[in-house]
Amino acid sequence: MTVIWRNLRRLQREGVPEELDIQGTINQICKMGCFLSPVLQSRRKNQVKLVLLIDCEGSMSPFQILMEALQASLAKAKFLHNTSVYYFHNCPRGYLFTQPNLTKPEPIEEILSQEAYDNRVVIISDAGAARRTYNSERFNQTQTFIKTLCGYTYLYGWLNPVPKSQWRTTTAEDIATIVPMYPIDREGLNDLVKILLGYPFPTGVGL
């Protein structure tokens, strides 16, 4: 997973020059005919901001280890300082929580305005597929949230820990028609990263 997340990074040099610029130093020696001092350059920093919205408790409890591995892979890809994580149960509505035990709530609109504007947002939930259920209220509430999210960014996607073959006849199947949804495997993560980079949504997916 780490290698795939690295494809999402956009590195740009910024800050105080403190890293040796080897080519620049060589060019200076060639130009001056002698070595005067090393040429320094700013370090490259990742400019991509990622916001994770993670469904927890209930049907998502069996996937806790997978969620931890997913976040660990982001840290290894050097996304740790560019990632904000919030939690919800079943679908984001009203509030998001800063703790996985669903404490310390903050209004959704406030979080989106501060964190999501022109940034990448990833929703992680089984969307009802884990229990093979369909819930129209869950779909409607999710649709309302996605409409709100669209006011801040078009760079968003959904990761589902349940294999795609098990989405059929569940709420996940319908949610996948309004949000690009992918299973958490190599192919799914690659497809998600493309969406977060601005590639078009799959045909037939959207509000």
Image (cartoon, rainbow, N blue to C red):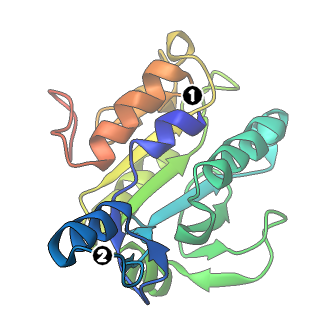
Left or right relative to 207: residue 131:
right
Amino acid carrying mark 1 in the image: Ile
Residue found farthest to the front? 33
Left or right relative to 90: residue 17:
left
Amino acid carrying mark 2 in the image: Cys
Lower position in the chain sequence, tag 1 or tag 2: 2
Task: Give the CA separation, mark 1 to mark 2.
Answer: 55 Å
Front-lying residue, 101 or 10: 10
Element type at marker 2? loop
What residue is disc 1 on? Answer: 184
- Residue 111, position in %: x, y? 49, 81
Q: Which residue lies at the image location 78% right of the left edge and 71% below the top edge? A: 99
What residue is disc 2 on? Answer: 34
Instruction: Check the image and report above or below for 135 versus 187.
Output: below
In which quadrant of the rendered image does the N terminus lie?
top right
- Residue 54, position in %: x, y? 63, 54
Instruction: Check the image and report above or below for 53 versus 72.
Output: below
- Residue 121, position in %: x, y? 42, 58
Q: Which residue lies at the image location 63% right of the left edge and 30% below the top edge? A: 161
Instruction: Check the image and report above or below for 112 versus 51.
Output: below
Left or right relative to 68: residue 136:
left
Front-lying residue, 6 or 116: 6
Left or right relative to 77: residue 38:
left
Q: Are marks 1 and 2 in contact (CB under 8 Å)?
A: no
- Residue 2, position in %: x, y? 59, 38
Q: Which residue lies at the image location 66% right of the left edge and 55% below the top edge? A: 75
Residue 84 in view, yes or no: yes
The tag on residue 98 is: none
